[in-house]
C-alpha cells in the first residue's frame, strides 16, 4: 500500500480466501484462533515453517521478520469485500520485502496487479465503476478543489446523477414499448411531449460532458511567473515567498539567466512559481538576448503573470543603457508600472503588479486594484500577495453539489448517450416511429449504465485498473 523507501511505518495488504492461512503462517495457530475482525493487534511476524518441517519444531524457532501491528477484516465487511489482512511493519524496505516474501509462501498467494484491490471491490459490489475510478483521483489530486471533487465522485455524486437520468429514460422506454405493443388500439402517441422529456435529459447529459477535465489539465500544476525589468527584485521576491534563499540574488542586473522554477504551497494547493531573467528594451549581449527570449517563452504558458516593478528611477539608475531608448510617454501622476504595462506589449499584460522594494520608496505607491506594495526585505505585503495568488489560481466557486468528471471512459460513455439522444430527437422531428425510438432509448440507457459499470467488459476493467498503483 505504501511506496518503496524508508519511513516510520509501511503498510502491506493481503486480500482473498487465504488470508486466514497467512495469519496462521506469520503469527501462529493461537493468533489465528483468537483473531477478531477489525481488532488492532501487536505481534511478531515470523517466516512460515516450511511445509516439510517436523511436528516437533515450534514456530517460535523461526526467525522474526518484524514486530508489527496488524488488523484482520472479515469479508464482506472490508475494502475488497473479501477477507483482508493489513500489516503495518516498520518502514524499512528490507522488512517489507521479507514480509511480502514470507506471505507469498502461503498457499497460492501472489502479488496484486495495479488497482486489483479496487477492482475486486467493484466486482464484489462494494462500489460502482465511477466510484472505483475516482479512487485514483483521490490519490492523485494535486490541490484542494481536485480533492473535493474526487471525494464527491467517490461519494457517488456522478453515480446518483447517472442513475436519475437512466431512470427517466427507463420510464420513457417503458411507455414507448407499451405503445409498440398496443399500436393498433391507441391514438397517435404524443411525440411532442416525449421530445420535451428527451430534451431535458439531453441537457443533463450535455452538462456532465461539458464538465470534463482530462488528466492533462488536472495533473498540471498552476503556473505563476514573476517577470519585469532587470534588478527589479524578482529573485528576492521568489525567495521571500518560499521562505528560503533558494535563488541567487545580487545588485548586478542580469543575475538570473535561465528561468528558475520552484514549487510553492498556497492554501489551495501546490503551484509552480517561476522566476525569470529580467526583460529589458535592448539586450546587452547574445546571452542576455537568449535569457530574455526564455523569459518570454515561459510567460506565454503562465496562468498568472506577475509584473515586478521596483519603480522606474531605480531601474534606470541600475541600467541606463538598457532603458535609455524607452519611449516614456508618461502622463502626469501615472505610475511607472502603468507606463510599463501600457507601453511595452512585449512585457505581456500583467495580471498583477508588485511594487517591489517598497521599503526603499519614500512616497508610497498608489493603491490600485491588482497591484500591491511588497518588500522582500521587511516582508510587507507578502501574505497579501500569497492570498491574491491563491484566489487567482484556485477558483473556489464550485458548490457542494457540483462536480466534474475526469475519466476519458466516462466521457466516451456520455458522448455515446448524447449521440443516441440526438438521433432520437431527430426521429421525433422527421420520422417518428415508436420502434426506432424505443431502440435508441435503449442504447442511451446502456451508455449511461456503463458509466457506473452495470454493463462492462473485461477489456474496459483491464484498462481502468491498469492505471492504478499496486496495493490500491
Ligand atoms: N531594500 C530592498 N532591496 C531589495 C528588495 N528586493 C530586492 N532587493 C535588492 O535588489 C537587488 C536585485 O535583486 P534581485 O532579486 O537579484 O533582482 P532580480 O529582479 O532577480 O534581478 P535580475 O535577475 O538581474 O533580473 C539586490 O541587491 C537585492 O538585495 C527589497 O524588497 N528591499
Ligand atoms: Mg533574478
Image (tube, grey):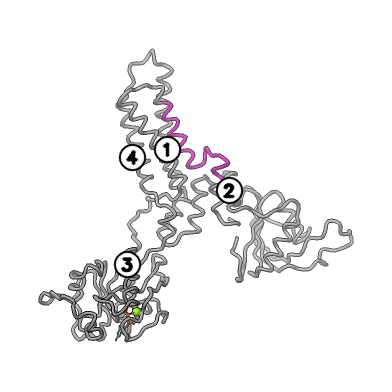
For marks 4 and 3, give the one nearer the viewer. Answer: 3
Give the answer, above or below, for where 456 lies relative to 328.
Answer: above
Mark 2 and mark 4 in contact? Answer it, CB < 8 Å: no
For marks 3 and 2, give the one nearer the viewer. Answer: 3
Q: Badge 1, how many Cα within 10 Å: few under 14, some, many 20+?
A: some
Relative depth, front residue between 369 and 305: 305
Q: Which mark is residue 21?
A: none
Whichever of callouts 3 and 2 sits on the residue coming sooner in the sequence is 2
Element class at badge 2: helix
* Image-quarter location of ligand 1: bottom left
Image point (51%, 58%), residue name: 139
Whichever of callouts 2 and 4 sits on the residue coming sooner in the sequence is 2
Q: Badge 2, how many Cα within 10 Å: few under 14, some, many 20+?
A: many
Q: Residue 416 carries which label?
A: 1
Element class at badge 1: helix
Q: Is the residue indicated by label 4 positioned so its CB lies within 8 Å of ligand 1?
A: no
Residue farthest toward the left in the current orientation of the protein: 332
For marks 1 and 4, give the one nearer the viewer. Answer: 1
The secondary structure that most of the magenta stretch takes on is helix
| Residue 440 x %, y % | 41, 29
Q: Name the residue under label 3.
A: 299
- Quadrant assignment, res 143: bottom left
Q: Distance between the residues labelled 3 and 2?
A: 43 Å
Give, as a single range, the part of the protein colored magenta: 438-462
Element class at badge 4: helix
Q: Mark 4 points at which residue?
A: 203
Amino acid at each position: 500500500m505504501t511506496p518503496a523507501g524508508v519511513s516510520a511505518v509501511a503498510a502491506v495488504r493481503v486480500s482473498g480466501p487465504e488470508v486466514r492461512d497467512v495469519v496462521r503462517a506469520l503469527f501462529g495457530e493461537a493468533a489465528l484462533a483468537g483473531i477478531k475482525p477489525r481488532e488492532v493487534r501487536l505481534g511478531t511476524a515470523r517466516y512460515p515453517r516450511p511445509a516439510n518441517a517436523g511436528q516437533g519444531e515450534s514456530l517460535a524457532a523461526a526467525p522474526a521478520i518484524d514486530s508489527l501491528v496488524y488488523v484482520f477484516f472479515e469479508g464482506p465487511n472490508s475494502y475488497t469485500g473479501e477477507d483482508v489482512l493489513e500489516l503495518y511493519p516498520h518502514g524499512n524496505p528490507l522488512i517489507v520485502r521479507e514480509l511480502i516474501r514470507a506471505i507469498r509462501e502461503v498457499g497460492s498467494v501472489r502479488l496484486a496487479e495495479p488497482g486489483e484491490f479496487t477492482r475486486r471491490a467493484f466486482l464484489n459490489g462494494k462500489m460502482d465503476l465511477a466510484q472505483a475510478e475516482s479512487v485514483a483521483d483521490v490519490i492523485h489530486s494535486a490541490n484542494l478543489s481536485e480533492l473535493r471533487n474526487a471525494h464527491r465522485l467517490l461519494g457517488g455524486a456522478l453515480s446518483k446523477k447517472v442513475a436519475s437520468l437512466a431512470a427517466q429514460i427507463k420510464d420513457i422506454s417503458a411507455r414507448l414499448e407499451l405503445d409498440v405493443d398496443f399500436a393498433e388500439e391507441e391514438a397517435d402517441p404524443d411525440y411532442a411531449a416525449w421530445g420535451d422529456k428527451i430534451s431535458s435529459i439531453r441537457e443533463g447529459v450535455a452538462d456532465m460532458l461539458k464538465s470534463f477535465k482530462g488528466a492533462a489539465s488536472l495533473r498540471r500544476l498552476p503556473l505563476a511567473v514573476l517577470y519585469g525589468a532587470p534588478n527589479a527584485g524578482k529573485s528576492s521576491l521568489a525567495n521571500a515567498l518560499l521562505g528560503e534563499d533558494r535563488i541567487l540574488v545580487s545588485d548586478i542586473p542580469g543575475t538570473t539567466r535561465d528561468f528558475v522554477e520552484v514549487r510553492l504551497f498556497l492554501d489551495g494547493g501546490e503551484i509552480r512559481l517561476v522566476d525569470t531573467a529580467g526583460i529589458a528594451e535592448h539586450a546587452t549581449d547574445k546571452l542576455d538576448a537568449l535569457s530574455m527570449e526564455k523569459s518570454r517563452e515561459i510567460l506565454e504558458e503562465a496562468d498568472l503573470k506577475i509584473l515586478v516593478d521596483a519603480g522606474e528611477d531605480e531601474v534606470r539608475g541600475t541600467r541606463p543603457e538598457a532603458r535609455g531608448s524607452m519611449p516614456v510617454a508618461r502622463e502626469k501622476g501615472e505610475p511607472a508600472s502603468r507606463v510599463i504595462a501600457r507601453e511595452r506589449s512585449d512585457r505581456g499584460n500583467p495580471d498583477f503588479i508588485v511594487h517591489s522594494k517598497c521599503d526603499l520608496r519614500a512616497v508610497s505607491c498608489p493603491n490600485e486594484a491588482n497591484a500591491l506594495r511588497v518588500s522582500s526585505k521587511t516582508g510587507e505585503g507578502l501574505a497579501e500577495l500569497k492570498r491574491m495568488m491563491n484566489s487567482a489560481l484556485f477558483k473556489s466557486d464550485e458548490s457542494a453539489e457540483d462536480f466534474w468528471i475526469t475519466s476519458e471512459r466516462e466521457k466516451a460513455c456520455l458522448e455515446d448517450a448524447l449521440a443516441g439522444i440526438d438521433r432520437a430527437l431527430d426521429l421525433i422531428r422527421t420520422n417518428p416511429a415508436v420502434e426506432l425510438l424505443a431502440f435508441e432509448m435503449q442504447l442511451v440507457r446502456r451508455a449511461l449504465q456503463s458509466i457506473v459499470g452495470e454493463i462492462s467488459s473485461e477489456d474496459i476493467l483491464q484498462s481502468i485498473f491498469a492505471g492504478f498503483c499496486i496495493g490500491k
